[in-house]
Amino acid sequence: MIELKNGDEIEIIRKACRIVVETLNLLKDASRPGVTTKELDALADAHIRKRGGYPAFLGYRGYPAALCVALNESVIHGIPDGTRLKEGDIASLDIGVKIDGYYGDAALTVPVGKIGDRAGRLLKVTEEALYKGVEQARVGNRLSDISHAIQIHVESNSFSVVRQFVGHGIGRELHEEPQIPNFGKPHRGPRLAEGMVLCIEPMVNEGSYEVKVLDDGWTAVTADSKLSAHFEHCVAITRSGPDILTRA
């Protein structure tokens, strides 16, 4: 069941999202060669708690950290294990915050130092695809209009959309209905309505869309070991259009 949020609830989600954005900005600035993923996790955890929130991922279904860090061929859910960032890496940073009973969630992929042209283009296209999807988050559209817009942009740029993982609703729970695939035909699925709050998050691979999960039970990587990028916004659907709650 898709739960619609009232204005007061959306403002609490926005409060959580504000802390998410602040944390991602700190992490982006800190993602330099030589820094470890555990140091990034500690930075995220400390800032969230300082701002009165709780790191939503910590302990979620047994996840052991506040932050997900997916490097290079890792797609999502990378555990910060102390790996040291190096020049030319790309790092997908995904963070959630709970405050006053509601959640916020967002992600971005950042370059570590100077990266290659192909990696840079992957990041650009993935972020563009996110906004293509957000643009479709309007009252009266269908859920798959978001999915289709993302897929078309990604594939027209010769990349592929991950199919095993999807976006989601958010509110009193970190993951709520509906699930939001990043691929599919348009004009299908639930009608979008005022009060829906959605996490739209394209995960885009340089090569094949196929992924596999490592033995840690969390880290998803590309099956062909090529690069992957991930961008995510938390968006409220309003009468006047999509309201990006995690806008920088």
Image: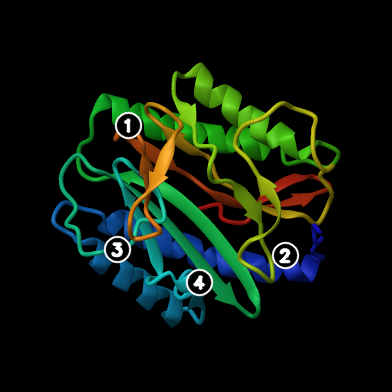
Give left or right: position of 192 versus 223.
right
Q: Earlier in the sequence, mark 4 or mark 1?
A: 4
Is 72 located above or below residue 28 in the figure?
above
The circle on residue 60 is 4
Q: Earlier in the sequence, mark 2 or mark 4?
A: 2
Mark 1 neighbour density, 10 Å: few (under 14) some (14–19) many (20 or more): some
Is 153 located above or below residue 138 in the figure?
above
Local secondary structure at mark 2? helix
Per the image, the residue denoted by label 2 is 10
The amino acid sitting under disc 2 is: Ile
Per the image, the residue denoted by label 3 is 80
CA–CA distance in space, label 3 to label 1: 22 Å
Image quarter where the N terminus lies is bottom right
Name which quarter of the figure residue 13 lies in: bottom right
- The residue positioned 80% from the left and 45% from the top of the image is 240
Q: Nearer the viewer, mark 3 or mark 1?
A: 1
Q: Earlier in the sequence, mark 3 or mark 1?
A: 3
- The residue positioned 62% from the left and 32% from the top of the image is 183
x and y percent of residue 225 in the render?
29, 35
Q: Earlier in the sequence, mark 4 or mark 3?
A: 4
Is residue 56 something that shows in the picture? no
The amino acid sitting under disc 1 is: Asp
Q: Are marks 4 and 3 in contact (CB under 8 Å)?
A: no
The amino acid sitting under disc 3 is: Pro
Mark 4 neighbour density, 10 Å: few (under 14) some (14–19) many (20 or more): few
Q: Earlier in the sequence, mark 1 or mark 2?
A: 2
Mark 3 neighbour density, 10 Å: few (under 14) some (14–19) many (20 or more): many
x and y percent of residue 17 in the render?
57, 63
Per the image, the residue denoted by label 1 is 224
